[in-house]
Image (cartoon, grey):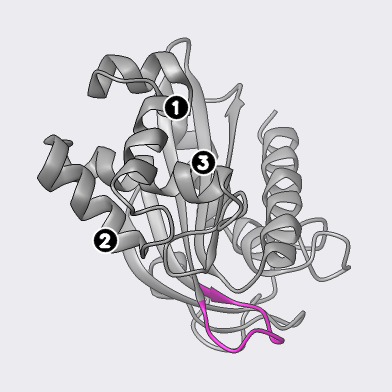
């Protein structure tokens, strides 16, 4: 978030919003109280009230990078691939693509392995994933739009609850594709770092595989 974008959208730079929060005695208030104050007292839209509050909490040390208001974490990774959406989707939809999502890229049963074995103990079709991979990740498909995106419950064996992973393909001029991973409800900052590296590796592997 930068001052120019904030000022264009809200009429004030970040420093002024932070000063107004403190002046109103809301500096140590809950996320909801700060956001409600910005909306009610200053007419900030609900979306921008949330964004300003998150940034205030992050810069004042109450929230670290990638942490959401419920104290969980999220991460986003994207990469432009030199191939059309249909080609990238075909790879994701294959057994090999599912292993890229479900398995450890460094393991022999993962992206670099053969493509003829089922990657999950349960159902192994991308639109109906429901099972655990050999490396211990549990996946369950909750939203499926062919050629566009898939949304999954995604949990590592050591996590107490699942995260939400969305994989989306967006067409780009020149028959290219933007591949995006967004994962939320991660349990810790360490998990966020691990998954950022994981999806960067997966995106790189996909980019190489469709060439």
Circle 1 SS class: helix
Name which residue lies at 30% across and 54% down.
Answer: 34
Answer whether labels 1 and 2 touch (C-beta < 8 Å): no
Tell me where residue 172 appears, x and y as whole percent: 43, 19
Question: Residue at horizontal 24%, vertical 42%?
Answer: 47
Eyeballing the image, is 178 above or below 173? below
Nearer the camera: disc 3 or disc 2:
2
Which one is earlier in the sequence, the residue at label 1 or at label 2?
1
SS for callout 2: helix
**Which residue corresponds to mark 1?**
15
Circle 3 packing at 10 Å, graded few (<14), some (14-19), many (20+), is many
Residue 179 inside the magenta-drawn segment: no
**Residue 156 picture location, percent across and down:** 66, 79
Q: Secondary structure at mark 3?
A: strand
Q: Is residue 8 above or below residue 21?
A: above
Q: Taken as a whole, is the magenta stretch helix, strand or loop? A: loop
In the rendered structure, the answer to whether residue 81 lies left or right of residue 44 reads: right
| Quarter of the view holding residue 39 | top left
Above/below status of 140 relative to 25: below
Q: Which residues are magenta?
A: 154-162
Q: Residues within 10 Å of mark 1 (few under 14, many from 20)?
A: few
- Precedes in sequence: disc 3 or disc 2: 2
Please say if the residues under marks 3 and 2 sit with CB atoms less than 8 Å apart. Answer: no
Which of 1 and 185 lies nearest the eye of the viewer? Answer: 1
Q: Which residue is mark 2?
A: 33
Label 2 packing within 10 angstroms: few (<14), some (14-19), many (20+): some
Q: Is residue 190 visible?
A: yes
For residue 148, say whether it is visible: no
Which label sits on residue 180?
Answer: 3
Residue at image x 47%, y 17%? Answer: 175
Marks 3 and 2 sit apart, C-alpha to C-alpha, by: 33 Å
**Is residue 161 one of those drawn in magenta?**
yes
């Amino acid at each position: 978030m930068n001052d120019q974008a904030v000022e264009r959208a809200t009429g004030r730079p970040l420093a002024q919003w932070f000063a107004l929060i403190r002046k109103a005695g809301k500096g140590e208030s809950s996320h909801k109280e700060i956001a409600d104050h910005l909306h009610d007292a200053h007419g900030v839209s609900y979306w921008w009230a949330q964004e300003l509050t998150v940034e205030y909490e992050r810069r004042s040390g109450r929230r670290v990078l990638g942490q959401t208001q419920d104290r969980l974490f999220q991460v986003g990774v994207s990469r432009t691939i030199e191939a059309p959406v249909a080609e990238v989707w075909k790879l994701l939809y294959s057994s090999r693509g599912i292993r890229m999502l479900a398995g450890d890229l460094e393991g022999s049963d993962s992206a670099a392995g053969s493509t003829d074995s089922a990657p999950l103990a349960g159902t192994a079709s991308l639109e109906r994933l429901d099972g655990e991979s050999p490396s211990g990740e549990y996946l369950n498909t909750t939203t499926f739009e062919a050629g566009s995106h898939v949304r999954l419950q995604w949990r590592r064996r050591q996590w107490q609850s699942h995260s939400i992973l969305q994989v989306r393909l967006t067409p780009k001029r020149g028959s290219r594709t933007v591949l995006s991973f967004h994962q939320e409800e991660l349990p810790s900052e360490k998990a966020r770092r691990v998954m950022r590296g994981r999806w960067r590796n997966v995106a790189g592997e996909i980019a190489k595989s469709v060439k």
